[in-house]
Amino acid sequence: MSIKENLEKVKQKIAYAAAKVGKKPEEITLVMATKTVDAERIREAVKNGGHVIAENKIQEALKKYDVLKDEDAAWHFIGHLQTNKVKDVLKFADMIHSVDRMGLVEKLDKRLMSEGRSMDVLIQVNTSYEESKYGVAPEEAISLVREASQYDTLNIRGLMTIGLFTDDEVKIRKCFKLLKGIHDSVIKEGIKGVEMEYLSMGMSGDYHIAIEEGANMVRVGTAIFGARDTPDAYYWPSEKTDK
Ligand SMILES: *Cc1c(COP(=O)(O)O)cnc(C)c1O
């Protein structure tokens, strides 16, 4: 299957899942998870209708950005963000999905202040409660949103999560329902400066489930580009062992 055909299939599946919950396909943003995919294949995907490129490693992202920055695509950062990489992430990212602690908020704010601009961010929540995963604990998510909302340089535009990696659909849904619940609570609270526009959840194995549970941003890699020829440690680069 070509990248073009894969993209068409993914878009069909998105449309099907969206229809199930009364949404139009264009209400769901397809984010292409492009880690380990070389620049030319990413370019092919952009030419064939994938307009968001998402990387999870800063150095890899910068290299590809250098080659692809003139393509018709937005750039998202979806990996764990170390505070010493803040300056670099701001060189390419249009949105950061992985804001999960105040230390990072403060570093981003400081750098953005000095550059005189703001950044769109999502708050990453660890809905699977796995020790190895990044993200703020679900119980602490709303207070992190509240605190981070005090910083004008950050436009909080929604929440992100990585669901439990399992074949058990009930357990996967539980993660997504949890994030949707937090999203609804934040909206209900009406925090000034916080826009709960995006719910970023769902990957190749479970994006249809995520959409059914309220996702309007899905991050899909393998289903577009094929299996990554890399060990698990790289497959889950957001794992804490990767530090
Ligand atoms: C790699 C990655 C994805 C996509 O994974 P696939 O299973 O290849 O679709 C989504 N989100 C994050 C944070 C990732 O690192």
Image (spheres, grey):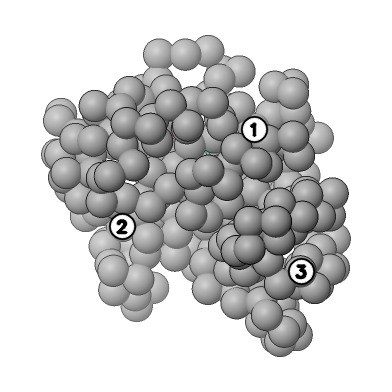
Nearest-to-viewer mark from 2 and 3: 3
Mark 3: give few (<14), some (14-19) or many (20+) Cα within 10 Å.
some
Residue that numbered label 3 is attached to: 151
Nearest-to-viewer mark from 2 and 1: 1
Residue at image location 52% in from the left, 67% down from the top = 198
- Comes first in the chain, label 2 or label 3: 2
Residue that numbered label 1 is attached to: 238
Three-letter amino acid code at the position of disc 2: Ile
Q: Secondary structure at mark 2?
A: helix
Residue at image location 34% in from the left, 75% down from the top = 23
- Residue labelled 2 has its Cβ within 8 Å of some atom of ligand 1: no
Residue that numbered label 2 is attached to: 14
- Residue labelled 1 has its Cβ within 8 Å of some atom of ligand 1: yes
Please determine whether, in this image, residue 76 is positioned above or below residue 117.
Answer: above
Quarter holding the N terminus is: top left
Residue 179 visible in rendering: no
- Comes first in the chain, label 2 or label 1: 2
**Residue at mark 2 to residue at mark 1: CA–CA distance:** 25 Å
Q: Nearer the viewer, residue 142 or 70?
A: 70
Three-letter amino acid code at the position of disc 3: Tyr
Residue at image location 48% in from the left, 37% down from the top = 55
Mark 1: give few (<14), some (14-19) or many (20+) Cα within 10 Å.
many
**Residue at mark 2 to residue at mark 3: CA–CA distance:** 34 Å
- Comes first in the chain, label 1 or label 3: 3
Residue 57, horizontal then vertical, whole percent: 56, 30
In the image, taking residue 240 as reference, residue 224 lies left or right, namely: left
